């Protein structure tokens, strides 16, 4: 009998006898393989243990699975490869418990400074935070306030002067602190910002409580940190938050030394079910280079050190991104002209990146404004990186990229990790600072594909929520709350948007032959959705529900009936 190619692949994959209980056959719904540049579906998939053994017709799948295999009927639901997180901050999910989340729908919407003060006061009362106890607020964005300005130190003091209050900006590139918090961080009106940081002041020259970029670390270092036991207790909830969105692979996009030690330690590794890629922050580079035992790009259990993260500029919505043109609204303090400034000097970036490159570690570079992207390109060129080298440097966000920079990316072999959610959350804000044609090229996913690049799309959690279907929708619709479309020519179709959550991020972390597709030999990582994104109207994409997430052949999350 002549073997089909699929059965031949099965025999290669299942070289040893398989116990029937190890075999699972999935059938009964669309199975989108993501294998190839055009949509491909199969009738059935067979898994053996943690690997995919077969993908093809149901008749051949039943023959491959044999008698006694478990049959999973999808009942019309759609199965895809597990989603891969191209960039987020996993550790934030382990430390935000107990704070006030302004995006939590359980609270009244905060629309002005008085409302923010009430929300903080209510939180203190509800949580019974005693005098001296820290009050931490998440997901603050001054652009959502009627005043269109930051709350001040004095206004926070009016809420509770006897408790340190820290209001973290949604971008994670800044915060506002009251007087008690500033005192705890040993900051006075005479304090000067560190290089790459900003301490904003009032008209009298007094600190107004706003700390931006590297100045935020002065406060973060003073805040109480969760213990290892507290982090461990939060670990399951953190990975379940990712599983609930269909992710089987997560990233921590700027890992600090204590979190490296925790997440690579035995206790955390025994708890982790999700694959977790860590990007140690460049501020700890010398210590990492001094450790000869570190292995980057290799899993220990479910965790690996992926590469080193550099930050070249800030966030555009906070007006700290670095541009070749001026912000129409000026600096965060209202000064003109202002086009932002780099967080790290170009000379320092190249010197540090050279050490990383020579060690053979992957480079990850945060760059939002086009001037910061220019810095990244010049840095890669200074290191002599070419696409043929297959080093795959990643430029995270690449938000306000210019068209001419795409060809530089192709020449170097850069993988752009885009952030289409900006078109919804801040597209209207960006148009108050830059011309419409500049904003239209935010996260140019279609142009990047046309230039021969392999892009990904990310949430940057906790900057925007961990909502994979919303990310698909923003990549396809690119519309703002005021119904303005940012760059209709950059819209993706559903399959292309799915590639940016599967095959694109898999390639960017050198795992394209391990995950991101449904193909024999790859990991049995799946997400099951209640509807097929390929046949769902664009406006209904964000309403698709995750039914189940499967990691290495085992169900790790199911929706409550």
Image (cartoon, rainbow, N blue to C red):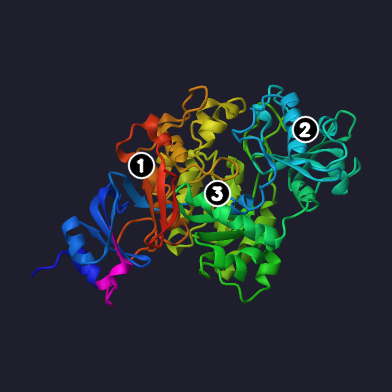
Viewer-proximal residue, 329 or 371? 329
On residue 121, the disc is 2
Callout in the foreground (3, 1)? 1
Q: Residue at x 65, y 35 (%)?
A: 102
Residue 530 on image: x %, y %? 35, 42
496 left or right, relative to 215 = left
Q: SS of the residue at dot 3?
A: strand
What range is drawn magenta here? 12-25
On residue 396, the disc is 3
Residue 324 on image: x %, y %? 62, 37
Q: What is the CA distance from the residue labelled 2 to the residue labelled 3? A: 37 Å
Residue furthest to the front in view is 561
Reply above or below: 535 against 460. above
Viewer-proximal residue, 256 or 504? 256
Reply above or below: 418 against 262. above
Number of marks in the rendered image: 3
Viewer-proximal residue, 491 or 324? 491
Q: Residue at x 57, y 62 (%)?
A: 307
Q: Residue at x 66, y 66 (%)?
A: 261
321 left or right, relative to 392 = right
Instruction: Tell me the quadrant of the picture where the C terminus can be found.
Output: top left
For residue 233, say whether it is visible: yes
Res 121 quadrant in image: top right
Q: Which residue is mark 1?
A: 530
Structural crowding at the residue carrying mark 1, measured as other residues with C-alpha within 10 Å and reported as few (<14), some (14–19) or many (≥20): some
Q: What is the CA distance from the residue labelled 3 to the residue labelled 1? A: 31 Å
Q: What is the CA distance from the residue labelled 2 to the residue labelled 1? A: 41 Å
177 left or right, relative to 443 = right
For residue 40, say whether it is visible: no
Q: Residue at x 64, y 41 (%)?
A: 171
């Amino acid at each position: 009998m002549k073997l089909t190619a699929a059965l031949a692949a099965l025999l290669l994959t299942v070289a040893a006898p398989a116990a029937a209980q190890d075999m699972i056959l999935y059938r009964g719904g669309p199975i989108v393989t993501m294998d190839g540049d055009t949509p491909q579906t199969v009738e059935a998939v067979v898994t053996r243990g943690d690997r995919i053994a077969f993908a093809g017709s149901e008749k051949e799948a039943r023959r491959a699975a044999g008698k006694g295999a478990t049959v999973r009927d999808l009942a019309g639901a759609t199965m895809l490869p597990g989603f891969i997180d191209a960039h987020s901050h996993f550790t934030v999910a382990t430390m935000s418990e107990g704070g006030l989340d302004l995006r939590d729908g359980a609270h009244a919407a905060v629309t002005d400074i008085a409302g923010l003060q009430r929300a903080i006061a209510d939180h203190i009362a509800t949580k019974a935070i005693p005098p001296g106890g820290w009050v931490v607020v998440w997901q603050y964005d001054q652009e959502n306030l009627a005043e269109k300005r930051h709350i001040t130190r004095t206004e926070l003091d009016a809420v509770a002067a006897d408790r340190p209050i820290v209001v973290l900006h949604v971008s994670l590139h800044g915060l506002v602190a009251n007087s008690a918090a500033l005192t705890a961080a040993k900051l006075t009106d005479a304090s000067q910002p560190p290089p790459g940081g900003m301490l904003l002041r009032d008209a009298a020259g007094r600190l107004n409580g706003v700390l931006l970029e590297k100045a935020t670390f002065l406060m973060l270092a003073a805040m109480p940190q969760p213990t290892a036991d507290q982090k461990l207790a939060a670990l399951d909830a953190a990975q379940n938050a990712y599983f609930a969105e269909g992710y089987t692979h997560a990233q921590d996009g700027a890992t600090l030394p204590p979190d490296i030690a925790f997440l690579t330690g035995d206790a955390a590794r025994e708890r982790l079910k999700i694959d977790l890629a860590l990007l140690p922050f460049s501020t700890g580079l010398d210590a990492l280079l001094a450790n000869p035992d570190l292995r980057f790009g290799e899993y220990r259990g479910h965790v690996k050190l992926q590469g080193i993260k550099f930050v070249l500029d800030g966030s555009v919505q906070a007006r700290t991104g670095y541009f070749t043109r001026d912000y129409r609204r000026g600096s965060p303090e209202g000064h003109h002209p202002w086009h932002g400034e780099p967080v790290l000097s170009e000379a320092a970036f190249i010197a540090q990146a050279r050490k990383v490159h020579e060690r053979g570690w992957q480079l990850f570079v945060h760059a939002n404004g086009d001037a910061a992207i220019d810095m990244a390109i010049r840095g890669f060129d200074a290191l002599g990186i070419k696409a043929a080298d297959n080093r795959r440097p990643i430029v995270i966000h690449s938000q306000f990229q210019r068209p001419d920079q795409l060809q530089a990316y192709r020449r170097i072999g850069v993988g752009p990790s885009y952030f289409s959610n900006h078109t919804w959350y801040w597209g209207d804000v960006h148009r108050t600072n830059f011309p419409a044609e500049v904003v239209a090229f935010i996260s140019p996913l279609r142009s990047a594909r046309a230039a021969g690049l392999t892009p990904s799309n990310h949430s940057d959690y906790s900057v925007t929520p961990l909502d994979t279907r919303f990310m698909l929708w923003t990549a396809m619709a690119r519309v703002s709350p005021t119904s303005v479309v940012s760059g209709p020519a950059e819209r993706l179709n559903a399959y292309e948007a799915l590639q940016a959550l599967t095959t694109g991020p898999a390639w960017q972390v050198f795992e394209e032959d391990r995950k991101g597709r449904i193909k024999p030999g790859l990991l049995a990582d799946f997400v099951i959705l209640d509807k097929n994104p390929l046949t769902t109207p664009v406006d209904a994409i964000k309403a698709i529900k995750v039914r189940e997430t499967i990691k290495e052949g085992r169900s790790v999350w199911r929706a409550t009936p």
